[in-house]
Amino acid sequence: MQSITSRRRLLGAGTAVLLATPRIARAQADWPNKPIRFIVPFPPGGSSDVVARLVTPVAGEQLHQSLVVENRGGAGGVIGADAIAKSAPDGYTIGIAGQGGLVVSPRLYAHRPYDPTRDLAPVTQLIESPFVIVVGRKVAARNLRELLDMAKARPGQMSIGHGGNGTLMHLSTELLNQLGGVQIMPVPYRGIAPSGAAAAGGEIEAAAVDVPVALSLIQDGTLRALAVTSRERIAVLPDTPTVAEAGVPGYETVGWFGLVAPAATPAPIITRVNAAFTTALRDPTVRRRLLEIGCEPRPTTPEQFRDIIRDESVKWNEVVEKANIRIE
């Protein structure tokens, strides 16, 4: 009797799966039949927001559906990434995540709300963009070496702003301290734009900011660019040396953003989203506009993006451990 009952239960479960499978297949085939929520993990005006508003219209055309940008800033990108991770895996919530949400947070937060590897599915890398070390008009340093010399003469008394604890900009300032042999106090702000504004207003001596955010302020003289953090100089700031050129050998850091979805999002939907956004990144107008603001388009496969996340995790874990950074 028990054996018969068990077989009936198995048959019932199998029937339920068979009945559900066509419904799931139809739902995926009909996707998307309503607007898609696109989460940006930083406030409006930051580079991730700028990138999102450049690429989503073209990606939306590819998907024949609108993508509605929603800014969910805070905690270095963790709040926005968590919102994506906890959304229904039906393809109607996707969004941007950077090193802060995917690489740095697992090493920094003692009690993080999500696991990037388990709870988020990589779709494609979107862009790479270096940071730029800037100072306001009131700071006497004309180059990075002079700023570092000032810091050595006043250990612990100078400050450098960044876009929030747990962001790559935060770790980039720690790396500058480690390789430059200085003690400049990192100061977090709620996003990149407020950090740049604080440097421009003289609230802090320097800031590490994204090129897209700082470019107009550098061009009008409000901020002075001392060095870019990439291995090579960049086209939009050709006269600005790299940090390594300016006197800190071995220094290199490049920010990037990628597209992610909730982990259980069906593979066919991931494939379609990847195709839509990689097409958008290769669109001549989108590509030109991204390059004009200092962003290099980087379309990848989901597997390639997963490898990038893995390799970056190794690099920045060393910086976190050396600086002994923890966020409760």
Image (spheres, rainbow, N blue to C red):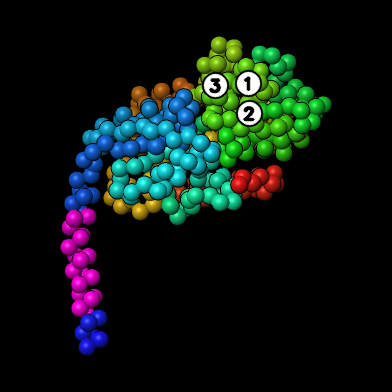
**Residue type at tag 3:** Ala
Of mark 1 and mark 3, the one earlier in the sequence is 1
Instruction: Check disc 2 and report the residue beneath it.
Output: 161
Residue that lies at the very extreme toward the top in this rendered image: 220
Left or right of 159 on screen, residue 282: left
Question: Quarter-wise, where is residue 323 in the image?
Answer: top right
Judging from the image, what secondary structure is the residue with disc 2 in?
strand
From the top left corner, tell me how far across and down residue 305 is, in percent.
44, 46
Q: Residues under labels 1 and 2: Cα distance?
A: 7 Å
Of mark 2 and mark 3, the one earlier in the sequence is 2
Give the vertical position of 184 relative to 196 (above or below): below
103 drawn magenta: no
Q: Which contiguous range is marked in magenta?
A: 7-24
Which image quarter is the N terminus in? Answer: bottom left
Residue at 31%, 34% in the rendered image: 67
Instruction: Check disc 1 and report the residue beneath it.
Output: 199
Instruction: Check disc 3 and report the residue beneath it.
Output: 214
Which label is found at residue 47?
none
From the top left corner, tell me how far across and down residue 313 is, in percent.
56, 48
Total number of numbered discs in the rendering: 3
Judging from the image, what secondary structure is the residue with disc 1 in?
helix
Asked if the residue under mark 2 is in contact with the one under mark 1, i.e. CB atoms within 8 Å, the reply is yes
Q: Which mark's residue is nearer the viewer, 1 or 3?
A: 1
